[in-house]
Image: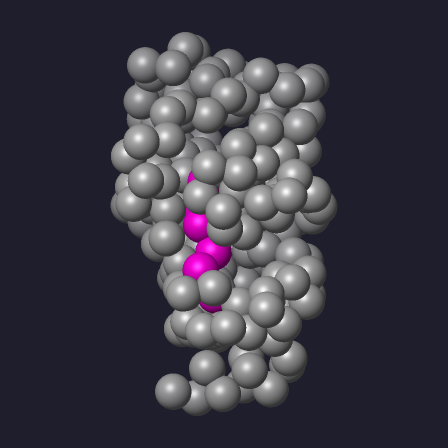
C-alpha cells in the first residue's frame, strides 16, 4: 500500500479515516484492501479532538468530520455518517442512529429499544433501510460526498455476533440472516457503507493519481 496525489512516494498515498471506531476501520480496510493506499485513522492522531455530528443530514455530518481532519493532517481524509431508517417509525432513528437513547447508550440497548418499539409490528411492515454517506475531503477544504443504501427489514430478535451497531437486528433484502450473521465478505459487498465506499473509489483513484491497473496489481500481491 503506497505514491500519492503527486506520485512522490509512499507517504503521500496515505488516506486518513476520520474515525476512532476500530470496527469501522477494519471494515473500510477490508473493502479497500485492493487499493494501494496506506490507511490510518484518528487512533494515529490523538491530538485531534472529538468531531461534531450536528448536521441535519448524513452528508453534512460526514463533511463536518472529514474537512477538519484533512486540514489538521494535511492528508486526504475520509469520513462517513450512516443510520438505519425504519418505515414503521417514520424513518427514525435515521440521522440520530448513533446517538439514539443518548451518547452513553450501548448498541445492545439501542437495538433492544428498536425491537420494543416494533413489538406489535408484523413482519410485512418492518421494512428498513441502512443509509451511508461517505465524504472525501482534501487539505485545501474541497470535499465530495457519495451515497450508498441497503434495503431490508428489522428482525424480530437480535441475532448474530458479527458486525456492529444495528447489524444484529437488520436483515438485508435477499438474505435470511441479519447483517451480524452473514459472512463478512457478503456484508462488505452489499452493505450501505460498502456501496458508498465503492462509489467514492473513482474519486480516490483520481486524486491519488492511480489507475485501474494499480488496483489489479495491489489485489494480486
Where does the image place residue 155, in percent across and percent down from the top left?
48, 36
Q: Is residue 195 visible?
A: no
Q: Is residue 36 visible?
A: yes
- In the image, farthest residue toward the top: 102
60 up-or-down from 181: above or below: above
Query: Is residue 124 found left or right of 166 in the rendered image?
Result: right
The image's colouring method is one colour
Q: Give the camera-side residue of 20 and 49.
A: 49
Q: Is residue 17 magenta?
A: yes
Q: Magenta-highlighted stretch: main secondary structure? A: strand
Q: Which residue sits at x=58%, y=36%? A: 67
Number of residue marks? 0
Q: Which residue sits at x=55%, y=74%? A: 7
Q: Which quadrant of the structure image shows residue 5?
A: bottom right
- Magenta-tinted stretch: 13-18
Where does the image place residue 74, in percent across and percent down from the top left?
49, 47
Where does the image place residue 176, in percent across and percent down from the top left?
49, 53
Q: Give the camera-side residue of 188 and 147.
A: 147
Q: Is residue 143 magenta?
A: no
203 up-or-down from 71: above or below: below
Q: Give the camera-side residue of 107 and 132.
A: 132
Q: Quadrant of the N terminus?
A: bottom left
Q: Quadrant of the C terminus?
A: bottom left
Q: Which residue sits at x=50%, y=51%? A: 75
Q: Which residue sits at x=62%, y=34%? A: 63
Where does the image place residue 86, in percent across and percent down from the top left?
62, 27
Amino acid at each position: 500500500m503506497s505514491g500519492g496525489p503527486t506520485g512522490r512516494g509512499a507517504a503521500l498515498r496515505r488516506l486518513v479515516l476520520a474515525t476512532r471506531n476500530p470496527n469501522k476501520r477494519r471494515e473500510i480496510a477490508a473493502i479497500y484492501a485492493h487499493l494501494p493506499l496506506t490507511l490510518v485513522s484518528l487512533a494515529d492522531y490523538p491530538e485531534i479532538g472529538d468531531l461534531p455530528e450536528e448536521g441535519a443530514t448524513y452528508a453534512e455530518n460526514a463533511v463536518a468530520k472529514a474537512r477538519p481532519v484533512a486540514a489538521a493532517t494535511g492528508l486526504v481524509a475520509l469520513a462517513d455518517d450512516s443510520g438505519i431508517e425504519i418505515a414503521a417509525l417514520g424513518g427514525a432513528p435515521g440521522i440520530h442512529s448513533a446517538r439514539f437513547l443518548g451518547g452513553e447508550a450501548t448498541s445492545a440497548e439501542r437495538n433492544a429499544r428498536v425491537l420494543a418499539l416494533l413489538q406489535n409490528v408484523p413482519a410485512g411492515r418492518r421494512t428498513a433501510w441502512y443509509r451511508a454517506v461517505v465524504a472525501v475531503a482534501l487539505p485545501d477544504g474541497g470535499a465530495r460526498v457519495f451515497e450508498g443504501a441497503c434495503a431490508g427489514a428489522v428482525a424480530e430478535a437480535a441475532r448474530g455476533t458479527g458486525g456492529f451497531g444495528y447489524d444484529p437486528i437488520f436483515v438485508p433484502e435477499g438474505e435470511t440472516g441479519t447483517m451480524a450473521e452473514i459472512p463478512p465478505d457478503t456484508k462488505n459487498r452489499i452493505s450501505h457503507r460498502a456501496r458508498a465506499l465503492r462509489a467514492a473509489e473513482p474519486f480516490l483513484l483520481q486524486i491519488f493519481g492511480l489507475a485501474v491497473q494499480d488496483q489489479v496489481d495491489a489485489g494480486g500481491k
